[in-house]
Image (cartoon, grey):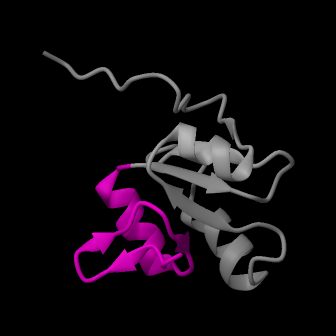
Amino acid sequence: MGTASSTTGAEPSGEIKNIREFRQVKLRAEGVIVTTGSKPPRAHRALCRELSEERFTEAVVFNEGKKGRYFLRRDLTEAVREFQAVACMKCKPERPISRPD
């Protein structure tokens, strides 16, 4: 499995390993971010407010992923299949995004 970055941007199936990749994923606002720091893992929309740079830095950079890692997946179905993740109760990635007319 590749990392979350490439020359064309974030891949929809990699581990997010550094703050640069995290920021790229958040800016693109595509896919689902799985965090493994809780039991069971949580699936979030890329723009979820629970996914802050501070939390990412603490979990991935300072603690070297020992208390949780971040992964980018295409959608909630993929996150559930691979990680048995549950949907974040705040951003509700299972719901379609409503766009203003």
Image position of 63 (left or right of 78): right
Q: Residue at x 76, y 49 (%)?
A: 41
Residue 21 position, x and y percent, is 44, 75
Residue furthest right as drawn: 39
- Give the percent coordinates (x, y) of residue 69: 70, 68
Residue placed furthest toward the left: 101
Residue 96 in percent (x, y) is at: 39, 23
Residue in the foreground of this view, choosing between 100 and 34: 34
Where are the magenta residues, as a range? 1-30
Q: Residue at x 35, y 26 (%)?
A: 97
Q: Is residue 67 above or below residue 37?
A: below
Q: Quadrant of residue 7?
A: bottom left
On screen, residue 52 above or below 88: below
Q: Quadrant of residue 4?
A: bottom left
Residue 39 counted in the magenta span:
no
Q: Is residue 18 magenta?
A: yes
- Residue 73, image x, y percentages: 50, 54
40 vs 50, nearest the viewer = 40
* Residue 49 in view of the camera: no
Quadrant (top left, top right, bottom left, bottom right) of the C terminus: top left
For the point 87% across and 48% down, which residue is it?
Answer: 39
Is 55 positioned to the left or the right of 46 in the image?
right
Please tell me which residue is depicted at 65% across the width and 35% down the height of the picture: 88
